[in-house]
Each structure stands twice: as C-alpha cells, then as structure tokens.
Image: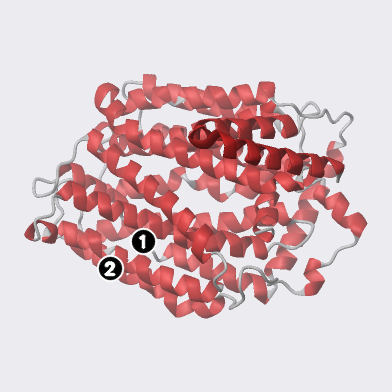
C-alpha cells in the first residue's frame, strides 16, 4: 500500500509538472511515463515489452505481412486460393498458445521461467528468416515450414512477455492499466511505421530481403532473454510437470462445460469462422489485374498503414464511447456495420467508384481504414467478454485458451476463404468471379447476427460467471496468482475501468 501511494503521488507530480510544461509535454510526457514504468518494474521489462510488442509484433509483423504477400506471389508464384490456405497454416502456432503459456509457467530451464523462452524465440526467428532470405530456390514446403517456425517464435515471445506482464500486474496492480497501454501503444506505433516502410523495402530489396531485415527483431527478442531481470528458481521438481498439466486441463474442461462459458465461446468461433478471409484474392487483383488498380509495392504499404490508423481510431472510439454498452447490443450493431463495410470492396471491384469520379487509391484507403476500424471495434468487446469468462485461479491460462478459440475461428476463415476462391476459379490472372466471392463474404459476415442469443445481455461491468466459480479462498487465490501465466493484467485492467 505504501508503494502504491508513492507511485500515485509520483503520477500526480508528473501531471502537475506536465501542466507547467505546456506543449513540451508532447515530448517529455511519454519519456517521463516510460521512466516511471522502468523505475517501478525494472528497465529490462520495459525493454522487453518494446522489443516484443513494438519491434517484433508491430514493425516486424507489418514487414512480414507485406513481405509474405509478395514472396508467395512473385517468388513461389502460387495461386490466390493457395496463398490463402498457406497463410492459415503459418498461423497455427498462435492456435496452440495455451501450450506455450503452460510451458513457460511450469517448465523452467536452468532455474528460469522466462529468459530461456525469449532466447528460443529469438533463435527460431533468426534461423528461419536467414534461411528464407539467403536460399535462392527454397522449395515451397520448406518455405512454409520456415514461415511457420518463425511464426512460432513470435507467438512464444508474445506468450512469454504476457507472462511477465501478468507477474508485474500481481506485484504492481496499480500499474496494470499502464502496462496494457504500453503494449497497445507500442504495437500500434510499430505497425504504423512497419506498414509505411514495408512497400519501399519490398521494392528496393525484394521480399527475400525483407525477411533478412526481420532478423533484427529476432535478435532483439534474443537479447531480451539475455538481459531480462528474473529471479532464479533453484531445485525445481520436474516430476510435478505432468500433474500440473493435468490439473490445468481438468480446470479448463470443467469451466468450458458451464453454459455461461461455452455459449459465448461458440459465438466467438462462429463470428470469426464465417467471416471468410479472401484478402489474398483482393491483393492479387490490386497488384496484377489489368482491369484493376495495379498498385505498386509502396502504395500497398501505404494502404496498410492507413488501415493501422483506422484500427487505432477504433480502439479510441471503443474506449471513450462504447466500452460500457451491453455486449449483445454492441455486437449487433458492430457486426451489422462490419458486414456493410465489405460492400466498399464490391464497389471497388465493380469499378463503381470510378463512375463517381473517386480515384482507386483514395477509395481503397478509405475502405481499408473503415474495415480495420470495424474489425477493432468487433475485437475489443470480445476481449472484454473473454476476460469476464475466466474463472478465478486460472485466469491467465483460460484467457489464452479463449484466444486460441478465436484463432481457430480465424484459421477456419482463412481456409474457407481459400476454398471459396478456388471454387469460383479466382486465379493469378482470372478475376471475373471475384465480385461474387466478395458478395458471398459480405452476406456471411451478417450471419453471426442469427446466433447473437449465445452472447449474454449483461454489461461489461457486471459478472457473467456463476458466483461459485468466482469465489476462492484467500490461500488458493494467493497460490494461483503466483502461477498465472498470461494476460492477467488485461483481466485486471478491464475490471478496473
């Protein structure tokens, strides 16, 4: 309590000082905020969050997305439907996030729970990115394996840094919101910068050269494993590992059988799975079609960067105006507008925008910003709902499970989208039926409205789980808090809003 009072006093002093600085606060305010976080949690933790969320996931994720799009199209020369399926395959490591989380929590290596997994993540990224960038004629199968292994490296780093955030949220609960803000801010800035420069680098050094650049974020993640300040856990009993896995599995299965939990989980899966992902077909049309815009690499990067701005605006809109709205009502309107926003793609492919005198670039930029904003508005209430579905004692592990359910939904969306493109014969050079694929996708985006009854009517500030699942003894709570592994800080920050 004394420490919490000191931090609150520090925050108040910073605010008063910033009032006197005026415009200089725009520069000094964030720096003072980072200094405060580094002082309270240790500088290596802040460095880890910036490296993983800002550099690896934000900037590196943006470069990887654009680089992979062009790598599949220009180097491997695959069809849009195949590229769509391959994109789903490379996302599989994110589906098994609970496994990575459990490993970081119950299987320490040489007495450390976090540092070895950062090192493993960095090594996976370094080896795979170098392999793709230096090999002149890498077979498609080995390229997919390398991309999937690289994705696993990013996923492991993500889970591990979230475990660090969870631990710091337990020891510094008054900083939970600040730590989540740092994660969101770093990810958004990194993505914005990454997308802005991605097209330029693809043009200058090619997609394989971009993969070579991705060794830099991997090296930073490796350095986090070397520098992170973490207590040593000597004499760990590895015989208890299997029992801990069994206990966690039983607890999660018991929770999933509760109607208040499985019904929203089913909705979340369906809402993602039926919103078919046909982005690869649109990407090929953007860049290759004689009747399309024929955008350059630089233009594609700028378009995605505007989409990142739209996502930021969506987060701001939700935080300031929509966060207290009932789940079912909010999801109804968001899903409705999300489906309608897809009509912008239909207008573009049918060239309706040109009939109104609107250039392709401006229309695509506007459409991308709107689509990403609606996607973020859909995602954030589902995050809050997921946090509310986590029972006491296994919050972190169960939240990771719920995120995996969402990832399975997005994987299904990608594969079903690839199947749709294949059935409609949308290829590298044939786009006559692309408009039909978009229309089917838009109609399916509205179908989750039919299963909204699975979502509770309650508002985000009330409990959803039965009281017996929320109540634990003090000793059990303290013991479980020491072992929670992932995104507990998000649960705490949501409850504290």
Q: Which mark is residue 440?
A: 2
* Coordinates of residue 156 in the picture (x, y in percent): 60, 38
Which residue has dot 1 on it?
Answer: 276
* Coordinates of residue 244 in the picture (x, y in percent): 81, 49
- Residue 112: quarter of image: top right
Gap in angstroms between the C-alphas marked 1 and 2: 9 Å
Q: Which of marks 2 and 1 precedes in the sequence?
A: 1
Residue depicted at x 31% and y 24% = 137
Q: Nearer the viewer, residue 260 or 416?
A: 260
Residue depicted at x 56% and y 40% = 155
Q: Which mark is residue 156?
A: none
Mark 2 lies on a secondary structure that is: helix
Disc 1 crowd rating (10 Å Cα; few below 14, some 14-19, many 20+) is many
Question: From the viewer's perspective, is 457 left or right of 339?
Answer: right
State which quarter of the image contains the C terminus.
Answer: bottom right
Which residue extends farthest right?
Answer: 475
* Coordinates of residue 145 in the picture (x, y in percent): 46, 35
Which residue extends farthest front?
Answer: 20
- Where 297 falls versus 368 (above or below)? above
């Amino acid at each position: 309590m004394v420490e919490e009072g000191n931090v609150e006093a520090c925050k108040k002093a910073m605010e008063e000082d910033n009032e006197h600085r005026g415009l200089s606060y725009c520069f000094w305010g964030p720096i003072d905020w980072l200094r405060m976080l580094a002082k309270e949690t240790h500088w290596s933790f802040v460095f880890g969050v910036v490296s993983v969320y800002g550099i690896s996931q934000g900037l590196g994720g943006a470069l990887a997305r654009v680089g992979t799009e062009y790598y599949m199209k220009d180097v491997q020369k695959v069809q849009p439907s195949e590229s769509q399926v391959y994109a789903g395959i490379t996302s599989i490591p994110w589906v098994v996030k609970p496994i990575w989380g459990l490993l970081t929590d119950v299987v320490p290596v040489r007495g450390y729970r976090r540092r070895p997994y950062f090192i493993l993540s960095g090594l996976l990224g370094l080896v795979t990115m170098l392999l793709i960038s230096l090999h002149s004629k890498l077979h498609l199968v080995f390229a997919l394996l390398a991309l999937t292994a690289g994705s696993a490296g990013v996923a492991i780093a993500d889970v591990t840094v979230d475990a660090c955030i969870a631990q710091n949220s337990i020891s510094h609960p008054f900083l939970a919101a600040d730590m989540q803000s740092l994660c969101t801010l770093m990810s958004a800035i990194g993505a914005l910068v990454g997308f802005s420069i991605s097209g330029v680098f693809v043009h200058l050094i090619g997609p394989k050269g971009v993969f070579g650049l991705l060794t830099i974020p991997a090296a930073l993640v490796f350095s986090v494993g070397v520098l992170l300040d973490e207590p040593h856990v000597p004499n760990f009993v590895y015989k208890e590992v299997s029992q801990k896995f069994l206990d966690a599995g039983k607890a999660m299965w018991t929770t999933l059988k509760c109607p208040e939990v499985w019904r929203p989980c089913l909705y979340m899966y369906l809402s993602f799975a039926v919103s078919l992902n046909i982005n690869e077909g649109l990407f090929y049309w953007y860049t290759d079609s004689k009747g399309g815009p024929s955008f350059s690499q630089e233009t594609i990067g700028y378009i995605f960067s505007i989409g990142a701005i739209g996502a930021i605006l969506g987060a701001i809109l939700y935080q300031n105006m929509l966060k207290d709205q009932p789940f079912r009502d909010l999801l109804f309107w968001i899903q409705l507008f999300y489906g309608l926003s897809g009509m912008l793609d239909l207008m573009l492919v049918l060239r309706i925008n040109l009939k109104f005198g609107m250039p392709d670039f401006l229309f695509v930029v506007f459409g991308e910003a709107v689509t990403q904003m609606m996607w973020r508005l859909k995602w954030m209430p589902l995050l809050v709902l997921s946090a509310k579905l986590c029972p006491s004692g296994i919050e972190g592990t169960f939240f990771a499970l719920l995120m995996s359910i969402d990832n399975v939904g997005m994987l299904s969306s990608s594969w079903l989208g690839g199947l749709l493109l294949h059935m409609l014969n949308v290829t590298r050079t044939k786009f006559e039926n692309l408009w039909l694929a978009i229309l089917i996708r838009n109609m399916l985006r509205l179908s989750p409205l039919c299963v909204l009854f699975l979502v509770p009517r309650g508002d985000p500030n009330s409990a959803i789980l039965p009281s017996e699942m929320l109540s634990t003894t003090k000793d059990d709570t303290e013991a479980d808090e020491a072992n929670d592994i992932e995104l507990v800080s998000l649960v705490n920050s949501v409850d504290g809003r």
